[in-house]
Image: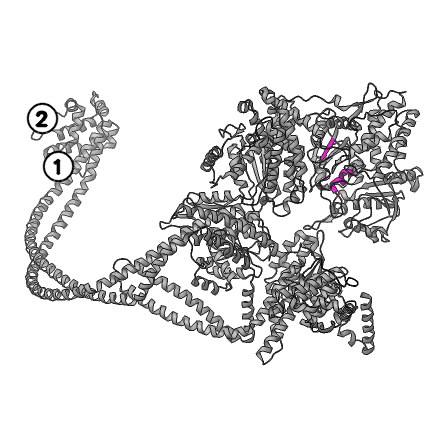
Amino acid sequence: CCFVLGAAGAGKTKLWETLAAAQTHLNYGGGPTIHQALNPKAVTTNDLYGYMHPVTKEPYDGIISKMMRDYSRMENDIPKWIILDGDIDAEWIESMNTVMDDNKVLTLVSNERIPLTASMRLIFEISHLRNASPATVSRAGVIFLNESDIGWRPYVTTWVETMGDQKVATTLEQLFDQYVAPMLDHMKREKWRHVTPLMDFAMVQTLCKLLEGLLTRENAPPGSDKEVYEAYFQYAAIWALGGGFNVEKGNDMRKVFSDHWRSEFAKSSVRFPDEGLVFDYFISKDDKRPAPWSEVIHEYKHDSDGNFSDILVPTLDTTRIGFLANMLLDLNKPIMLVGGPGTAKTSLLQMLLKAQDPDTNVHFNINFNSFTGAESLQPMLEQPLEKKTGSSFGPPGTKKLIYFIDDFNMPAPDAYGTQSAIELARQQIDYGGFYDLKKLTFKSVVNTMFVGAMNPTSGSFSIIDRMQRHFATFACPFPDQEVCRRIYGQILAGHLEAFPSSVQNVGAVVTEAAIALHTLVADNFLPNAIKFHYQWNLRELSNVFQGLLQATPAVFGSSVQMLVRLFVHEAHRVYQDRLVDEADCIRFTEQVQKVVKEKLNTVGKEEVLLATPLIFASFAGDADDHVVGPIPTIDELSAVLNKKLREYNENFARMDLVLFEDAMAHVCRISRIINRPRGNALLIGVGGSGKQSLTRLAAFISSYDVFQIKLTPTYGMNDFKEDLFNLYFKVGLKSAQVTFVFTDQHIFDERMLVYFNNLLSTGVIPDLHTDEDKDNIVNGIRAEVKAAGLLDSRDNCWDFFISKVRDNLHVVLCMSPVGDAFRVRCRKFPALCGCSAINYFHPWPRDALVSVADKFLADVEMEVPEVRAACAQHMAFVHSSVGETALRYKAAERRNVYTTPKSFLELIALYKSLLAGNRATLDMLQTRLESGLVKLKESSAQVADMQVQLQEESVVVENKKVEVDALLVQVGQESNIAEEESAKAAVEAEKVAVIQSEVAEFKAQCEQDLLAAEPALAAAAEALNLLNKSALTELKSLTSPPKEVLSVTAAVAYMLAPPGVNLKKVDVSWGGSKKMMASVENFLQALLNFDKDNFDLQAKEYVRKYTGPADSPDPTFNYDYMKSKSFAAAGLCAWVVNICIYHDIFLEVEPKRKKLAEAEAKLDDANRKLADVHARVKMLNDKCAALQQQLSEATDEKNGLIEKAERTAKRLNLAERLVNGLKDEGVRWGEGVESLREQKLLLIGDILVSSSFIAYIGPFNMIYRRDLINQQWLPDMVARQIPMSENLNPQKKLSDDATVAQWNSEGLPADELSIDNGAIITTCTRWPLIIDPQLQGVTWIKRKEEKNGLINIQLSQRGYMDKLVKGVEEGSPILIENIGETIDAVLEPVISRGFISKGHRLILKLGDKEVDVACAKDEDGTPLAKPLFKLYVQTKLPNPDYIPEIQAQTTLINFSVTADGLRDQLLAQVVNHERPELELSRAQLLDEQNEYTIRLSELEDDLLYRLANAEGDILSDESLIASLEATKVTVHEVEVKKRESEHTYGEIAKARDTYEPVAARGALVYFLVDDLSVIEHMYHYSLASFDRVFNRALRKAPPHDEPAQRISNLSDVVTLAAFQFVTRGLFERHRLIFATKLALDVLQASGELSAEDVDLLVRPPAAHDTHNPLASWMSNATWDAVVALAEAKPGVFGALPEDMDGSWKRWKEWTETETPELEPLPQDWKRLSAFHRLVLMRALRPDRMHLATEHWVKDSMGAAYVEALPFDLEATFEDASASVPIFFLLSPGVDPVVPVRQLGHQMGKTEEQGKFVTVSLGQGQEPVAEKALDKMYVEGGWAMLQNIELVARWLPKLEKKLESLIEGAHPDFRVFLSALPQKVVPVPILQNSIKLTNEPPSGLKANMLRAYMLFDGTVWENSSKQSELKAIVFALCFFHSVVCE
């Protein structure tokens, strides 16, 4: 193995290539030397070595493993080389160690072992060994090639031989010696820096290529003079050596180079003119002399119809660089343009590439960004290629493909400084291709070359020299003022050609002013870390003139001043809108005034040109015109925008916007941006500033569609790409205008910004469209391309499509400037800032706040308008005061609190809601009290009246009783008579019933006989129905009918014969029959009307002759037979037969019918008799009933009078009871009514403060809360004379004692901050977001909402969205626990309360799903727009930094434990341990007190409610009166019990207060421990872990009978236990800090030290310029410190300066001793207290403070507080559990695995038993770690995860994983973690862990203890000579400790 090491161009590659060629030439090894080259940094580690699929476990091969396997299988001795040409890093080179050492084997993940055979070699071609370990370097030979070892001369010597004959070669070599060598030496000597680092060899290569292009036969014919070659050589050398120089930080390196060139080569035969720079000239083909480039610059022709983005004005730079670039492109020499943003690098190269012959050249654009890596670049490089032959690929046909890579240096370097994308491109340039990552074979890429552009101030600033050397590098300087004047002057002049001459004449003046202003801005507004986007380049200047080109003659006419005002307006928009604060805006305004005054004073007066408002908009006049024009007044602008807002609200979801002046200005700005082609906006402002809402309005005004992505739990990059694909289709093919609104809240993956970067910069997103998609797009747009007059080639169609997309798709990025994310994103993705117009949203001004408040308060009822105005002013003051307080809060507490406009709007909405609700409540209470009072007064007034009424009613009742008795006798007599007559009627009724039965039976029999005749009658009728006119006519027309027919007609004739006629004379012949049927209608009617009941019997006898007798009918006389003769005759036959049958039956029934008639007559007679009897009975009964009714009424009247009298008596009793029982309440209620009336008047101010309290106060601690309320808000209320209560406490206004008692019983701590928080949580309208590191808030919420069906959610749970949806739909309370600093974007609609009304439905969009929100309903059951569900969000992070958007959407509440709250909790624990019965009684009494308070409130409310809501007469409701009396009794009993309980509780409290010092000490220590995270992020501790330590300490404290001593013991043990628990996890450098702070706090709490004393030590006073009498031995600084001590503490140190001056020898002796901290102070100062001695030590000997502090802590607290604890894992393990991991904080040289493994052996947890797993985290080890945790969780083993800080992205998942493993874990399950101190470790993991450090301690004793503890008892027990062994071990430990020290 060999390292070939050296800089770019040092000859490394040629070295091994020459050696390979030599071996091949010598046939070394029996054949040609074969080699394969690979850049290991151009592929991933998996692609390099192969990998194992994490799921299928299938092994996949790698490139290098395939190479080695192929070579190792070759059974010959031919040399085989593997060239690894790429930087070394620790990741890939370590896997080669086994190949490079004596093993010579490559071991793969699949356990395959590939040997390195004797004929195989590894050659590493590298630039450096920075990242190689010593072990790696030692395994290979190293050949170092310096840049000058070979140098550039051999290359030149070889090259000149290709340039012609020997004379030319000699001439060129002389010229290289004459010009190049001295110039390169001078540049090195003077340390001139190019725009990017360039190697000498690279510049010489560029020079040679330039000469190849210049020394053509046309320019230098054969035989030309040396002067010709020298002229072209100078020109080429100037650009090759000096083309990379630029103007940098005011230093014009081009001028320096030019001046030196002229002076150095002044005597050369070819001299450049003195004017300008040498770069300003080219060599004329005519006279071979320098000629100025300015003579050949093309003239610019303005195209009024063209796009501004397509304008490129030819300049000096574009002309000369274009010439060089075209020449080098023809020579296949890669080109790179390097320059700052906005220097037209990209535009120039794109113009050159587009100008190439499309038949021979094609180009492909690639934009690099920070995410571009080799794995993403390779598909882009392959995209335009097609397969040629075998493994050869190239562009289509014989064309040359030019890759244009923009932002070449943007890819983010990896941990080892390598940019893999650039390494891949370098591999293609160096070796002509790259590897197929599937086939693992080399792809040869032909006919390609690279050009590039990069900004040296962004990305990695430069690229690796091995890549840079391939390019001819030219700097693109920012144009000077003359060039800018030429560019923009020509553009503006071209546009103004259509204007009057007066306007045209002012164009030059405006151009001059624009350039002057740009220069001023660039010079005065410099970028820094916050103002990183203050980059002022040609883009800004172009944007100003693009705005000027919006002017039209129709609008501007001949108004010169209007054009100038448009320029001023555009300048403000382009420059001022980028400025971050008001101070910069003011400075910019001053700059504008200066330019207008100096440059535009000839156009008009300054006050006219700068008059406000200065507004130009595309909707001027009419919002639909889209013509830019001025809007003269704010009122006109307001009218237009408010009209559009109303139209918007009619068509879309309502936006309740207040368009104050600033808001309208932002609408105009956004509209201005998106109305332009390729207009993209970057809106910067905190959340809630209105960025999205105003964008929607601006887009609506422009008639654009608005698009936003819809995040769902499953939304990923593929969904995002699909959205982009659809957008491209819509705007590119459908020509829709779309505004794409995208916020930083939508960024779920930073890779999304890669797409925006490409979209904004070029519009081309490489992996968005497949080839098939492109074909479809090309075909879809081809017609438009032809219509535009362009050739419809594939490239033209695609470019046309992309151009349309860029013109029609307007991206509006809404970003927050808070934090570093925005700055980092803009640095990684420069197009975000560079290719979009920035509009900075500053905080709303005070006037805007007041304006908004005024509008929303307009509909609030107030006494006078002045109060409403004062309220609006106070709201604005509150908002501002919170912002100012937040700055102080951050400085003091390091907590970020943000105020946003949305917060202010929420304040207003909350105020209106609370005010309306409280007014309604007070009205209801007042109505209830007044109603109760009215009813009490009414009852009192009725008592006397009811007493008189009762006496009168008693007399009436007695009289009524006598009348009723007389009436009762009469009724009895009449009833007897009626009964006798009723008996007679019953006898007659029985007789009639018998007759009725007989008649009914006989009648039924007759009817049954008649029914038998019915069928015959029906048959006869049916027969007639069969006859019709035609049938009878047919029958009649027969001349000689059959005999049978004649029989039928004869029978009919007899039947129809008139009554009484002689039947013998009836003509029955056929003739007679025909006469009978002469009129068919009459004949049929006669048949129908035949009287069947009175059928003549004689006629019947004649008929029977034909039909036959009834019992023996004639067989021929029937229907069936007759039908064969005649259909009509058959019908007549059937009629005759059936009539005869009917008549036969009728004759039988007729006698019976006569008898029936007689019986019915008899029945009628009997019924008449019965009716007479009944009438008599009825008359008697009616008389009895009348008497009975009279008796009943008299009786009812009597009873009514009795009841009335009783009611009166009862009402009298109830009234007396009610009036006497509620006499006290009546007085109190009367007072209450008056109080409520007063409260209503003061409600305006009370609710104003309370709503401010709810909206803003939550994030602050108690100190800042009191300051805001008492020192700022209330004084402002008083000053503005807003009515409010005296001594107003917002918490008391928001809750009452009963409510607080209820909260306390549910677990809410009783301290003031917690109760405030409870009031905020229960009244806020935004969902509460609770900062709850000690879990006090979440515990209360769980108990509070448990009865309401609380749904508990953790985002780590699977299916948490389903639980959330369920809660929303069912209206249940929802608790989201333990969120991080960011909230999943999917939850944003819930968090922001993004409800949408659809009819009576309220829905919530969660991603693509619409969820119905359960809502409250009104009295009619109609749903209200008020969701029933409640959402609580909680985080365990102690100090989360939530972005403003989240703080605006939620009510942030700081629930961190307070000193008072913690002291109460710890006191409860102490008392519970010491006197459990006392604590139990206290807890019971506390519950009783809370219950009594709640019960009293409920009873009082119930009493008043029932009285006030009683319907009708209250004195008639006995149950109500009784209930009210019972309630009154209960209230009295409860009050008595409450007083007794309070007394008992007070006695218990006195007893408990004895232990208060222990609780106070515990609280003091906890808050000190909690502050340790300020020192180091890893020092986070939870209250739960502290509680464990605290309780364990209570158990270990030594007992004592004396209470005072027992309390002292408890305090000491608690302090020491907490100290030891913490210090075992502290690094050595922090232990003394912790001990000292603990000592200071303890002594200060005990009163031994004051705050002033502590300040003396921590912040010592200073005195200056004092006379030092001891200057001979004491420094002035020390003497100043002494004097300052005397002045600060005269009572202690007042005499010190004088004493030191008088006794200076003693003080000098003490001060200069080696250990002054151990020596007594001179004279009486030895009696100085230990602390003041320490203060003095700091002043005199600060170098000894460390040891002096140790001694002081030891004296103050004890030796245990300064001695380092030995590392004791076994003792620590006792505190660990399945839910409490052990966390090792690593320090250099410490391996925690060893002690864990040793402890595991003792406890049976070993790797051999499968009970101990250790995972060293790094790339790809996360799944292994998760699997280990899961396995040990079930089996009860130990899992140790090492170096978790290396997998920062996985740590949030680990946090959730550890949480999920708490429940159900095996009791023996343990987790061990280790990490170096890094901020990436999540706080919850640290809080929940026991932290351990094993850092080597300082001090001889500590080191000896640490070493000696390594030997346990088994060592001594196993020795036969224990004493000797112990002595030897002690000596060894002593020696080891001395060495360590």
x then y, percent, for residue 837: 61, 36
Name the amino acid type tagged 1.
Asp
Vertical comparison of 839 with 787: above or below: below
Name the quadrant containing residue 1709: bottom right
Q: Nearer the viewer, residue 1703 or 1722?
A: 1703
Which residue is painted at 10% across and 59% down in the image?
1190
x then y, percent, for residue 482: 70, 28
Residue 408 magenta-highlighted: yes
Vertical comparison of 1440 with 11: above or below: below
Q: Neighbour class for label 1 at 10 Å: few (<14), some, many (≥20)?
A: few
x then y, percent, for residue 78: 89, 42
Residue identifier under label 2? 1065
Residue 91 magenta-highlighted: no
Q: Magenta segment, which residues? A: 402-427
Q: Nearer the viewer, residue 863 or 1606?
A: 863
Name the amino acid type tagged 2.
Lys
Which residue is painted at 67% across and 58% down in the image?
1576
The tag earlier along the polypeptide, 1 or 2, is 2
